[in-house]
Amino acid sequence: MAKWLKRLLGTEIKANEEKSDLFPNDRQEFHDDPYPFYEKLRASEPFYRTADGAWVISRYRDNKTALDHPALGNSPSRFSTLSPGKADRYVCANLANNIMPFLDGTPHREQRRAVARIFQKEVKSFTGRLTLLADQAVAGLGEEFNVIEEFAHPFAIKMICEILGIHVEPRLRDWSASFFYLFTKIPTATVRDEVDQHLAEFRNWVHECFQTSKPTGVLAGLADLISADELKEETAIDIVILLFADGLENVDSGIGNALFTFSKHPDQWGKLRGDESLVKSAVNEVLRFESPAQYIARTCLEDFEWEGNQFKKDITVILLLASANRDEQAFPDPARFDITRSPNPHLSFGRGKHSCLGSNLVELELAAILTALRKKFSGFELIGEIKWQNRTGHRWMEEARFRAQLTE
Ligand code: HEM
């Protein structure tokens, strides 16, 4: 029985001969190329039921319906480590219940509106600086480089720290890796304790950042809300943690995945080099083709029926966005990477009430990076194999080395 799938979805899969042939036996095979697995799931079990009752949705149209479904919410189920009832016991539960990805209804709407106003204003004022930082990051590249360590990460961390108004600190990376356990199943009590310790340290550090005499960036906007008694400092701290982690990890891999994809499709790189007006659609296609976010979760708020399937209150529903992005019913020839694809309504940022708050920043960052790269390099070649992080909810690179050819 494919035990790796149990870890994949954070749930247990029935030992069932019929089902086991849906999945690759080898977890490495899945990391290298998850898309054949998604294709089989869409074709044979678009509503997949795991042994502990969770539903896995893989088709585009069903993901779209689920994203707007009034009976699917974001607050953690009572079975989860993050349930509101455990907020006094675990730092992770306490933090989760303070931030918008885990809130529903009015608390979600109000927090999102306040944060979006402050965040988008900063992003807008940052456009020129963003281009400069992307140009500098590309100018510093030699002909061989490790894409995450030497390129994507230094760029992404500088960007998000400046926008937020915090300084770069070595422990940020471990802290944000722990933060992302909020979006997958926390495997053991030991991991949960470590996550709690990191999040407590992260909170203390952000608290100190707020003590600075003249805050800048998003921090300044949030400090104003705290002074006006419109936001509690504890919530503001957790919002900074959310924005930092979201602004770092997915962007690192968004850049890495873009290079990886173009290295496999040199004709598309040639096309982009020949026509700068294709940058925007190339960004969208990279996000569709190799989304850093593979799935997101929802919780059933009540019992309901959907296409003859029974969805019970408090059950987890996994939305396989990366599978939806490759659905042949929604995208003609979905396995083809085509930077001129239009329309391209990919779901990599989700959609609706909880859709990614940083999507415009991501698009600007990727566009600035591709614009700078296309001037300097005529192509990329992957050296050896990519090491993917051992995750399933995200397609994040651990390490990948590239050789790049300079333009004549
Ligand atoms: C390639 C990069 C990124 C990808 C693929 C991505 C993807 C996503 C996805 C799939 C969601 C969940 C949508 C849902 O639940 O319906 C989300 C939510 C969110 N993202 Fe991003 N994201 C990226 C970068 C960023 C950045 C740079 C920021 C900001 C600094 C950001 C901030 C957020 C926030 C605050 C939410 C929660 C929104 C809410 O619950 O209302 N993301 N993102």
Image (spheres, rainbow, N blue to C red):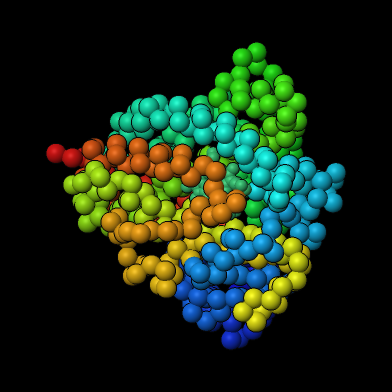
Q: Quadrant of the N terminus?
A: bottom right
Q: Nearer the viewer, residue 182 or 195?
A: 182
Instruction: Tell me where residue 63 sits by quadrant.
Output: bottom right
| Residue 172, x across and y down, in percent | 60, 34
Residue most extreme to the bottom: 18
* Image position of 273 (left or right of 181): left
- Can residue 166 be seen by looking at this rendering? no
Instruction: Tell me where residue 363 sits by quadrant.
Output: top left
Q: Residue at x 44, y 47 (%)?
A: 254
| Residue 157, x across and y down, in percent | 50, 33
Q: Nearer the viewer, residue 404 or 317?
A: 317
* Image position of 303 (left or right of 157): right
* Image position of 230 (left or right of 60): right
* Residue 234 in the image: above or below residue 328: above
Q: Quadrant of the C terminus?
A: top left
Q: Residue at x 72, y 54 (%)?
A: 75
Q: Nearer the viewer, residue 34 or 84?
A: 84
| Residue 217, x across and y down, in percent | 55, 24
- For the image, the number of numbered tags is 0
Residue most extreme to the left: 408
| Residue 396, x across and y down, in percent | 50, 51
- Can residue 42 be seen by looking at this rendering? yes
Q: Nearer the viewer, residue 169 or 70?
A: 70
Q: Residue at x 39, y 42 (%)?
A: 366
Instruction: Tell me where residue 178 sits by quadrant.
Output: top right
* Residue 336 in the image: above or below residue 366: below
* Image position of 7 (left or right of 158): right
